[in-house]
Image (cartoon, rainbow, N blue to C red):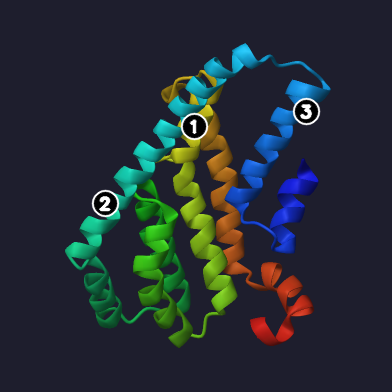
């Protein structure tokens, strides 16, 4: 199964979503016909549980996309662009500004609309300050990833709690400890860009610069 998922994506044969579907079909085949640990009459309950889990994810994504549409409708991106123009920030101040913006966005909307709406505004400003585009992209992606486990959006947190049967509020303490480690990593990445850029520069020096 790891070969199907990772190999399928890295080889370009399928996307991450498509590889997940293939992996599910593969595991279904194994449990039904090879190991025979699953019976056909048990599939109904499995499908119902899967539908509930999918509904939870889709409701979160739909709400986040609506929030993204509202931000686009009220031209919040233009306001951010005007704010960046009026604020003469040093590179380190701009980095902290990016973390703050995308951390707030990640708490309320999905990462895809957040990237589509705000990265075209943030990226040129960062490049004008001399930031490496790969460094800036990693900071943005890591910050948005934090939003996947922080309420009220917290899609991964909600799904994990649903699968494990744990109430979300009971996980805040443990999640907070892990988020502290992630935030520390993020700050180290911000302060020491070469810590993460040395490998891309070694592999694709012309693309990273």
Q: Which residue is mark 3?
A: 30
Determine the CA span between mark 1 and mark 2. 20 Å
Q: Quadrant of residue 27?
A: top right
Helix, strand or loop at disc 3?
Answer: helix
Secondary structure category for the residue under label 2: helix
Residue 166 falls left or right of residue 101 = right
Does residue 205 appear left or right of residue 147 in this picture?
A: right
Query: Would you say residue 156 is visible in this rendering?
Result: yes
State the image coordinates of residue 113 (x, y, percent, origin top left): 37, 59
The one nearer the camera, 36 or 127, is 36
Where is mark 2, residue-wise? 67
Of residue 78 and residue 36, the one placed in the foreground of this image is: 36
User: Disc 3 vs disc 2: which is toward the camera?
Assistant: 3
Q: Quadrant of residue 79?
A: bottom left
Residue positioned 59% across, 74% down in the render: 134
Q: Residues within 10 Å of mark 1 (few under 14, many from 20)?
A: some
Q: Which residue is mark 1?
A: 159
Please report the residue visible at 70 percent of the width from the left and 68 percent of the height from the top.
195
Q: Is residue 114 above or below residue 36?
A: below
Per the image, label 1 sits on a secondary structure element best described as helix
Work out whether mark 1 precedes mark 2 in sequence or the reverse, and give the earlier one.
2
In the rendered view, does 63 fall on the left or right side of 10? left
């Amino acid at each position: 199964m790891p070969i199907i998922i990772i190999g399928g994506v890295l080889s370009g044969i399928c996307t991450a979503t498509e590889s997940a579907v293939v992996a599910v079909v593969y595991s279904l085949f194994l449990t039904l016909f090879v190991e025979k640990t699953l019976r056909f009459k048990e599939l109904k309950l499995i499908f119902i549980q899967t539908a509930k889990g999918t509904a939870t994810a889709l409701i979160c994504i739909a709400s986040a996309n609506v929030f993204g549409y509202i931000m686009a409708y009220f031209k919040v991106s233009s306001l951010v662009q005007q704010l960046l123009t009026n604020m003469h920030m040093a590179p380190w101040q701009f980095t902290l500004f990016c973390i703050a913006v995308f951390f707030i966005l990640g708490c309320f909307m999905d990462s895809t609309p957040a990237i589509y709406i705000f990265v075209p505004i943030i990226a040129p400003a960062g490049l004008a300050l001399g930031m490496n585009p790969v460094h800036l992209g990693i900071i943005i992606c890591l910050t948005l990833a934090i939003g996947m486990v922080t309420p009220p959006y917290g899609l991964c947190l909600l799904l994990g709690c649903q699968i494990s049967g744990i109430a979300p509020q009971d996980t805040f303490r443990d999640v907070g400890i892990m988020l502290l480690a992630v935030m520390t990593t993020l700050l180290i990445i911000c302060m020491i860009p070469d810590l993460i850029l040395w490998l891309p520069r070694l592999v694709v020096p012309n693309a990273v610069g």
